[in-house]
Amino acid sequence: MKFDGPVVCLAATFAFAGLALAEPKYGPGTSDTEIRIGNTAPYSGPASAYGTGARAMKAVFDRVNAEQGGVNGRKIVLLSLDDAYNPSRTVERVRELVEKEEVSFIAYPIGTAQNAAIQRYLNTKKVPQIFVGSGANQWGDYKRFPWTTAGVIPSYDLEGYAYGQHIGKTNPDAKIGILYQSDDLGKDYLKGFLAGLGEKGKAMIVAELPYQITDPTVDSQVVSLKGSGANVVAIFALPKATAQTIRKIAELDWKPVQYVAGVSSSVGSVMNQAGLANAQGVIAALYAKDPTDPAVRETPAYKDYEKTLATYYPGGNPQETINVNGYNAGMAVLNMLRQAGDDLTRDGIMKAATSLEFELPMMIEGIKLSTSPTNHTLMSQIHLGQLEGQHYKLIGGLVSR
């Protein structure tokens, strides 16, 4: 079955539940009664803030199971294991999911280094690694990794490009300081950022400082960035380091224009930690609807999302952006499973995952998601937003690359 067009809300997706092909085909983890899905997430460790996203995805599945008996009469069983954001532990957990639990596929595994650690293993085993919870460029490399697709967040390269392009247009004489995570995440942001700045980009950068995910603080780097004379700061970091940076900038009574990674744009878990007053004016790449925006909270899409969390993940804060991402990932999986119909072999799952075209209710209007056998990227559009008060105001138009 080919699904075209937007999904209005989770409740509306139930109408598809009865559609099925005539002759079911099954692979590991699938049967007449269930579909077993694997996931890894950091429920502990330095990036534990992201663990809530996997719980939000599970809430989507729990609701479909409880209210409609699953997809095509099959309950979705999500086995989500803690990897503490440690790549070696991710490998252990994924091997357990594939070899012991015999899941059908791995969905929304969180983290760049974590997914890189399991990508070759899953592709060798021909186990779908879909809707990856990371924006690294390599998830779209369909030639090297045909069993992997990117997720419901944009590539870090696209985000970096949008920031660089915006600075080039609005502040061509900027002196730019960069703090970046010293891994593939930071490198992808830097690559896109330089491309967006254009020919004069390198000359605009006055400081470029790395940090390690295990660093207890980035205060020394922030002091050095101020000392460089930068009046624009690009923060390509995870939530903890991002909050520390924004807070330290305020303590130094320094007032540069600040750009933050989309993965660290949450008002609830990042900007409030940094001090909301300190974060005013921060610019971030947006793709999901801002759950802190009063106008968004009045929409049917938000109310349906809120109902899902309230009923099936009551501890989840609906105004947490990471929960929106997890919800969107769950909705994407539902679309993919409907597309697969009754061909639930791993080949069938992968075929469905690479022939998608849809929109999601909690995405910014106009952002379309699509895949094909030669396009595993899923998202190629984003919007920039600037923090005003307690929520982001969209600036400019959609950015594509």
Image (cartoon, rainbow, N blue to C red):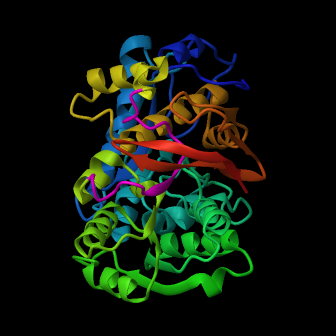
In which quadrant of the rendered view does residue 85 lie?
bottom left
In which quadrant of the rendered view does residue 222 lie?
bottom left
Main structural element of the magenta stretch: helix, strand or loop?
Answer: loop
Q: 38 and 243: which one is in front?
A: 243
- The number of discs equals 0
Q: Look at the picture and state if 51 lies above or below 299.
A: below
The magenta stretch spans residue 279: yes
Residue depicted at 37% across the width and 70% down the height: 255
- Judge left or right: residue 78 versus residue 168: left
Residue depicted at 57% across the width and 19% down the height: 8
- Asked if residue 169 shows in the view, the reply is yes
- Judge left or right: residue 397 versus residue 103: right
Q: Residue 364: where, in percent of width, then height?
A: 57, 36
What is the span of residues highlighted in magenta in the rendered image? 276-294
- Asked if residue 342 shows in the view, the reply is no
The magenta stretch spans residue 176: no
Quadrant of the image containing the N terminus: top right
Q: Look at the picture and state if 256 lies above or below 225.
A: above
Q: Residue 72: where, in percent of width, then height?
A: 55, 17
Residue depicted at 58% across the width and 53% down the height: 154
Q: Residue 401: where, in percent of width, then height?
A: 73, 57
Residue depicted at 41% across the width and 28% down the height: 61
- Judge left or right: residue 43 versus residue 306: left
Q: Look at the picture and state if 348 lies above or below 194.
A: above
Q: Residue 92: where, in percent of width, then height?
A: 35, 63
Q: 391 and 338: which one is in front?
A: 391
